[in-house]
Image: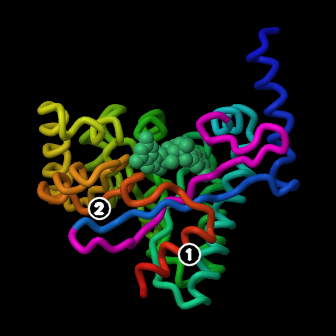
């Protein structure tokens, strides 16, 4: 067996117990309204604090979690953690934000996600309208009828729906038309080049205009410079997320960021 396959097996074995051992952490990245400069939303991003290897990023362990089925309890943990945090922040008088969470392809095909989200909405009545789920196109096109039924159900319960990494997959207009989508997130690979590459600039402007004509909110991902932020604002992009505003932060760091905004 190759060293890589062996390492993957080892990680898979450890990942199963990572929730009980409290090794998972949720970090929070602000999403900023480009016309007011205010943080009105955040994305919750999971990390694994591995006892030997340190902080492991989701690109390394989410695919393993999906293949092994660990994604189910892992996603429940992420949702629970995010909702608990939002309630704690509300108790501390912090402004109510929209919390966005990533849902993987495997989950949307299971009924469990509906039940879990339903439970959270009942637990925290105020959560309705304040929870957004981010999905990629590839997770939806495989079984569009089933996905449509599930998403309509969630949408009726007040869950907002965002299409993540838009532009990298099918960029399907049919999906945008038929599914109850609220938000389009333009992939960071386009944003990276908008100040240097005329084609990237044209594509991003076209996505913003198309989304607006469908009455969708547009968020630019991976904004790293003030020039990119200024250009996106000039084009009428609604919101932005990226290192220029803030990296994903542990809860305490994120609270400090919010408090700076309030004061
Ligand atoms: P994503 O949903 O597209 O999340 C955005 C990623 O871009 C995050 O990477 C974030 O740290 C990174 N990012 C933010 N601003 C910038 C920037 O200015 N420049 C650059 N170069 N990158 C930036 P991260 O946290 O490593 O997450 C990677 C992917 O893992 C996410 O992509 C998402 O698809 C997945 N993921 C993260 N958390 C979860 C989770 O709880 N559940 C599931 N199913 N997937 C998750
Ligand atoms: Mg995302
Ligand atoms: Mg993305």
Left or right of residue 39, residue 50 in this image: right
Question: As rendered, which of 67 and 91 lies closer to the eye?
Answer: 91
Q: Regarding mark 2 in the picture, which secondary structure is present there?
A: strand
Question: As rendered, which of 124 and 202 lies closer to the eye?
Answer: 202
Residue under numbered circle 1: 255
| Residue found at x 84% / y 39% | 52
Q: Position of residue 106 (x, y in %)?
A: 61, 40
Left or right of residue 22, residue 38 in this image: left
Q: Residues within 10 Å of mark 1 (few under 14, many from 20)?
A: some
User: Is residue 23 something that shows in the picture?
Assistant: yes
Above or below residue 36? Residue 54 is above
Q: Position of residue 172 (x, y in %)?
A: 28, 37
Residue under numbered circle 2: 239
Instruction: Please state, as top left, top right, bottom left or bottom right, where the C terminus lies in the image.
Output: bottom left
**First in sequence: mark 2 or mark 1?**
2
| Residue found at x 49% / y 60% | 29
Left or right of residue 191, residue 91 in this image: right
Q: Which residues are magenta?
A: 35-60
Above or below residue 204? Residue 169 is above
Instruction: Please state, as top left, top right, bottom left or bottom right, where the N terminus lies in the image.
Output: top right
Residue 188, image quadrant: top left
Q: Residue furthest top?
A: 1
Left or right of residue 101, residue 18 in this image: right
Q: Position of residue 10 (x, y in %)?
A: 84, 28
Residue 20, image quadrant: bottom right
Q: Is the distance from the Cβ of mark 2 to the nearest ligand 1 atom less than 8 Å?
A: no
């Amino acid at each position: 067996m190759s060293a890589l396959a062996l390492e993957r097996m080892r990680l898979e074995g450890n990942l199963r117990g990572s929730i009980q051992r409290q090794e998972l952490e949720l970090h929070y990245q602000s999403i900023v309204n480009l016309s007011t400069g205010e943080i009105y939303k955040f994305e919750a991003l999971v990390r694994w604090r591995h006892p030997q290897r340190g902080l492991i990023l989701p690109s390394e362990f989410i695919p393993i979690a999906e293949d092994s089925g660990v994604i189910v309890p892992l996603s429940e943990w992420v949702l629970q953690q995010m909702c608990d945090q939002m309630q704690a922040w509300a108790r501390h008088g912090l402004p109510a934000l929209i919390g966005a969470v990533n849902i993987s392809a495997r989950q949307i095909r299971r009924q469990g996600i509906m039940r879990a989200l339903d439970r959270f909405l009942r637990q925290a009545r105020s959560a309705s309208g304040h929870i957004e789920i981010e999905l990629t196109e590839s997770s939806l096109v495989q079984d569009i009828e089933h996905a449509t039924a599930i998403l309509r159900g969630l949408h009726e319960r007040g869950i907002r729906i965002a299409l993540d990494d838009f532009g990298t997959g099918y960029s399907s207009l049919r999906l945008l038309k038929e599914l109850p989508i609220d938000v389009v997130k333009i992939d960071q690979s386009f944003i990276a080049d908008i100040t240097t590459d005329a084609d990237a600039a044209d594509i991003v402007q076209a996505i913003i205009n198309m989304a607006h004509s469908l009455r969708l909110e547009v968020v630019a991902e991976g904004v790293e410079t003030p020039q990119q932020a200024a250009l996106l604002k000039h084009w009428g992009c609604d919101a932005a997320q990226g290192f220029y505003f803030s990296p994903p932060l542990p809860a305490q760091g994120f609270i400090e960021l919010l408090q700076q905004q309030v004061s």
